[in-house]
Image: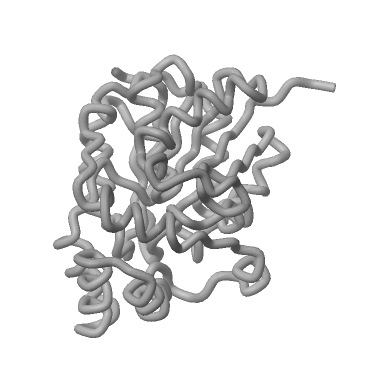
């Protein structure tokens, strides 16, 4: 018996579960205890209520979850939307994480950058589908967006067996896209991060673009940044490379420069 560090992984979305995150980071289980909760209202968690589907609540949920299950000083990994939450936790509760890993995320979402990248990758049809979902999301625009734009998130396609396990709550996703997605700003939280931080982004990411990720790295003092070429959101077609970078960061004794 030996104690292992906890890698607390926060999934993307919102509205999705942890399946895609698990498929990427499960190989780290030889190094850390991998914990993969579905966040409030997401996946297989209780639905909760719309007044609590917001970043303030999701951020406050993480230290409460850690206290409830006895997790101390986890390595906090957030991917996409999970990165928004992880960044907020690290900025508002700086003594909670031992290290912070942010994958394909940003302190702010800038639709104009995203729309330009969608057009580059998928032409005017993709730009229009994304623009409609940014401007006035509902179930129809969300499903059209997922049909046209999600395949552009990464070269190649995800494992169909993993996709078959995904549980979605469309209502939570629509609520967030129509309310907080384009107006939240976690720049102050980024400046308040005090733990060693690794930031990963994909060169071809159309939703949290490489420029957004670079801006995030500039906002977090002493952070380490890697932009991986030939991949997009979540770095899924380069997952072995991404996991290797994360593994090295977890095993290192890096000290935060801030």
Give how far across and how far down residue 183 sits, in percent. Answer: 19, 47
Q: Is residue 102 above or below residue 177?
A: above
| Residue occupying the point 20% across, 71% down | 131
Give how far across and how far down residue 215 sits, in percent. Answer: 21, 43
> Is residue 69 in sight in this rendering?
yes
Is 103 situated left or right of 47 in this image? Answer: left
Give how far across and how far down residue 224 sits, in percent. Answer: 35, 35
Q: Is residue 180 above or below residue 96?
A: below
The quadrant in which residue 214 appears is top left
Is 3 situated left or right of 89 in this image? Answer: right
> Is residue 256 in sight in this rendering?
no
| Residue occupying the point 28% across, 47% down | 213
Q: How did the renderer colour the structure?
A: one colour
Q: Quadrant of the N terminus?
A: top right
Q: Quadrant of the C terminus?
A: top left
The residue nearer to you, when weighing 52 against 18, is 52
| Residue occupying the point 43% across, 55% down | 172
Q: Residue furthest top?
A: 95
The quadrant in which residue 51 appears is top left
The residue nearer to you, when weighing 20 against 172, is 172
Give how far across and how far down residue 14 sits, in percent. Answer: 43, 53
């Amino acid at each position: 018996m030996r104690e292992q560090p906890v890698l607390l992984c926060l999934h993307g979305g919102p509205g999705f579960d942890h399946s895609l995150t698990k498929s990427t980071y499960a190989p780290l289980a030889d190094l850390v205890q991998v914990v993969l909760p579905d966040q409030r209202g997401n996946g297989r968690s209780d639905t909760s209520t719309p007044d609590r589907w917001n970043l303030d609540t999701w951020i406050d949920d993480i230290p409460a979850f850690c206290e409830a299950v006895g997790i101390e000083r986890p390595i906090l990994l957030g991917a996409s939307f999970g990165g928004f939450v992880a960044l907020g936790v690290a900025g508002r509760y700086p003594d909670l994480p031992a290290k912070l890993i942010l994958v394909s995320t940003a302190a702010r979402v800038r639709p104009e950058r995203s729309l330009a990248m969608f057009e580059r990758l998928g032409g005017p049809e993709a730009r229009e589908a994304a623009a409609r979902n940014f401007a006035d999301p509902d179930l129809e625009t969300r499903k059209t967006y997922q049909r046209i734009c999600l395949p552009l998130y990464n070269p190649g396609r995800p494992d169909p067996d993993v996709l078959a396990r995904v549980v979605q709550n469309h209502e939570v996703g629509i609520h967030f896209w129509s309310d907080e997605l384009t107006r939240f700003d976690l720049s102050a939280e980024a400046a308040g991060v005090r733990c060693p931080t690794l930031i990963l982004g994909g060169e071809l990411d159309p939703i949290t673009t490489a420029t957004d990720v670079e801006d995030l790295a500039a906002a977090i003092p002493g952070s380490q940044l890697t932009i991986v070429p030939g991949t997009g959101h979540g770095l899924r077609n380069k997952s072995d490379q991404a996991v290797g970078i994360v593994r090295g960061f977890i095993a290192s004794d890096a000290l935060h420069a801030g």
